[in-house]
Image (spheres, rainbow, N blue to C red):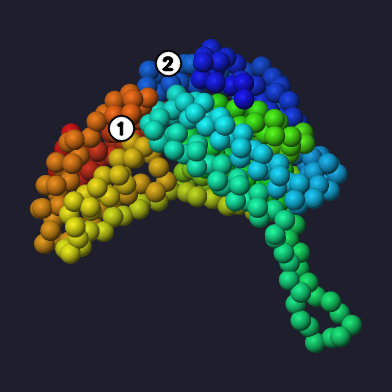
């Protein structure tokens, strides 16, 4: 992989379409800000509707290209396994890129990058083991069976909090089964997805099998969700954006798979081990500065242990180290973007207005 944190500094990143990095039609580039310093550290292309159309056309062409369509399942599995090896070999660089882009702790991102290859390896092994069924019918001259086939072009819109981990969960099986893909990474964390595109080229996937169109949701994302040749959309993000994607996709009868907003609760009963429960609650909400899909953003505590639990929770919370995400001693780094900081502060203010008491901080 050529892209590293050092090489990204001040760089302009282009779109990845049909196996090549290409400049955007409009010539428009946007700044990506390091949340630790609040300074721009590279620029990325903003794809407009024409760029998105070209990417979808490249994916559609690759889908019917015999080099991909007629590749045996075993050979597809080998390609996916090679990609797993390349991701593992470049795990440290990918982790550094994501930490610079979204401010998450380097120790967390290293662990993520070293676990991601397992998913590619898992689905690589599944590539030639997907089977249909022969279904009995009451006529001797008929054969009734089903087959599993790739769906076509899949549009993926990924979040900023764990870009490659969230992408892998759908990209790995899509590649293993023979789909083609157009990815729109978050405008707040673009670089790691484009770095992955380099590894996809190096692994030997045919041109157009994976394409990356960077840009904002309002421009690039909206254009992607209006494409008639996309069979399915995968999205992780807010409920409001999910509604817009579903509405756009409905016009072309495209399927949607979405993970939207939630409010995951911790429930603490009176027979709990207080120390273990506190550790679970702290890791469940403070990990990634709370910027995770499974954050334990509510906590219900049985009345008989409430005071003891809160006292222990406050004591443990006060020992959390806030600092630079590249330092191993840091427990919480910066929020990923200024708008996120404003939103979190507004939630705290709203809670206080409604009667909450701030116990720490």
**Residue 312 as seen in the image, left or right of residue 293:** left
x and y percent of residue 24 in the render?
A: 68, 21
Residue at the location (46% across, 43% down)? 238
**Residue 178 as seen in the image, left or right of residue 170:** right
Q: Nearer the viewer, residue 100 or 256?
A: 100
Q: Residue furthest right?
A: 141
Task: Count the marks.
Answer: 2
Residue at the location (50% across, 50% down)? 259
> Dot 2 surroundings within 10 Å: few (below 14), some, or many (20 or more)?
few
Quarter of the picture containing the C terminus is top left
Q: Which residue is mark 2?
A: 39
**Residue 33 as seen in the image, left or right of residue 181:** left
Q: Nearer the viewer, residue 252 or 117?
A: 117
Location of residue 18 by image quarter: top right
Q: Is residue 176 above or below residue 159?
A: below
Sequence-earlier tag: 1 or 2:
2
Residue 234 appearing in the image: no
Query: On residue 310, which mark appears?
Result: none
x and y percent of residue 350 in the render?
A: 25, 41
Q: Is residue 61 above or below residue 149?
A: above
């Amino acid at each position: 992989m050529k892209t590293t944190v050092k090489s990204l500094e001040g760089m302009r990143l282009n779109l990845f379409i049909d196996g090549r990095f290409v400049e955007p039609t409009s010539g428009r580039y946007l700044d990506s800000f390091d949340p630790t310093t609040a300074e721009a550290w590279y620029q990325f292309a903003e794809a407009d509707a024409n760029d998105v159309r070209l990417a979808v056309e490249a994916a559609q062409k690759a889908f019917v290209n015999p080099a991909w369509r007629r590749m045996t399942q075993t050979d597809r599995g080998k390609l996916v396994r090679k990609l797993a090896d390349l991701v593992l070999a470049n795990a440290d660089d990918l982790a550094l890129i994501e930490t610079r882009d979204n401010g998450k702790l380097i120790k967390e991102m290293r662990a993520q990058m070293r676990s991601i290859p397992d998913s590619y390896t898992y689905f690589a092994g599944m590539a030639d083991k997907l089977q249909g069924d022969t279904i009995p019918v009451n006529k001797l001259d008929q054969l009734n069976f089903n087959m599993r086939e790739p769906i076509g072009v899949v549009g993926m819109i990924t979040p900023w909090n764990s870009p490659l981990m969230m992408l892998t969960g759908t990209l790995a099986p899509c590649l293993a089964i023979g789909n083609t893909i157009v990815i729109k990474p978050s405008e707040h964390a673009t670089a790691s997805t484009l770095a992955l595109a380099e590894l996809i080229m190096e692994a030997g996937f045919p041109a157009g099998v994976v394409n990356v169109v960077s840009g904002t949701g309002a421009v690039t994302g909206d254009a992607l969700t209006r494409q008639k040749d996309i069979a399915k959309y995968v999205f992780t993000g807010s409920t409001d954006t999910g509604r817009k994607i579903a509405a756009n996709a409905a016009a072309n009868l495209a399927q949607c798979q979405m993970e939207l907003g939630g409010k995951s609760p911790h429930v603490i009963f009176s027979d709990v081990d207080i120390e273990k429960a506190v550790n679970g609650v702290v890791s469940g909400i403070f990990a990634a500065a709370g910027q995770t899909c499974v954050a334990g953003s509510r906590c219900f505590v049985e009345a008989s242990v409430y005071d003891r639990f809160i006292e222990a929770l406050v004591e443990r919370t006060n020992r959390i180290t806030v600092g630079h995400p590249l330092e191993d001693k840091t427990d919480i780094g910066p929020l990923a973007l200024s708008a996120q900081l404003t939103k979190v502060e507004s939630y705290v203010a709203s809670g206080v207005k409604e009667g909450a008491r701030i116990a720490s901080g």
